[in-house]
Image (spheres, grey):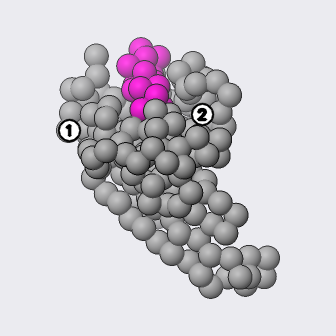
Amino acid sequence: MTGPVDRSTVDTLEPLIDAVRDGVEGEGWTLSGLQKTSSTEFEGRWAGQSTRSAYLFFHREDLETVSVEAYLDETSRGLTGSLGLVADVRPLWELESVPRALNQVAALARAHLPEGYQTPVTLRLRLPRAEEDAREAELEARVKLRIPRAAMAAGSSAVSALAAAVVKSLEAILEDPHSRTVLDLDGEGGLS
């Protein structure tokens, strides 16, 4: 963990990073990567704007195909962020259809993520080599919860508490027996 979290208002990127880390690491996930970027050269609609972003990657030693990721952004317009689960999806040939798989992941998100938040769900398909057949595509599910500005305005404690609650909800998705029909969790020692 990063140590005691300042309980003041979260108004810049660094306190937001610390608050998210505090909540996620408090649930037993370890920070395995942190990438910060700054952008200041925009044209057109965004001329004169600037952004600072952070990507945080968390893992648990007992889970190989699952991670928790956070994307946090500080812009001229304020802070935004999301916290989400990234998990491998069963091989394409094991799925009835991609739309059905997306519906299954969405149903898991609805069942376990707290109500009242924006919770986008994504399935990504990737073909490792262009010469491979599409049936060999690798699939990945992403279930996110957008951190509301109200939580950031409430301070670091609120953001940490929300991050911890989201991680517990994401873990509940993994523990749900229905998740095994769509997520590739075979051999994951940390799940029942």
Q: Position of residue 94 (x, y in %)?
A: 45, 30
Using the image, determine if residue 111 lies above or below residue 97. Answer: above
Using the image, determine if residue 114 lies above or below residue 133. Answer: above
User: On the image, numbered disc 2 is attached to which residue?
Assistant: 102
Using the image, determine if residue 8 lies above or below residue 130. Answer: above
Q: Position of residue 60 (x, y in %)?
A: 25, 38
- Res 96 → quadrant: top right
Say if the magenta span includes residue 166: yes
Which is nearer the N-term, disc 2 or disc 1? 1
How much space separates mark 2 and mark 1, taking CA atoms?
27 Å
Foreground residue among 44 and 4: 4
The count of marks equals 2
Q: Quadrant of the N terminus?
A: top left
Q: Amino acid at mark 2?
A: Leu
User: On the image, numbered disc 1 is attached to which residue?
Assistant: 61
Foreground residue among 51 and 127: 51
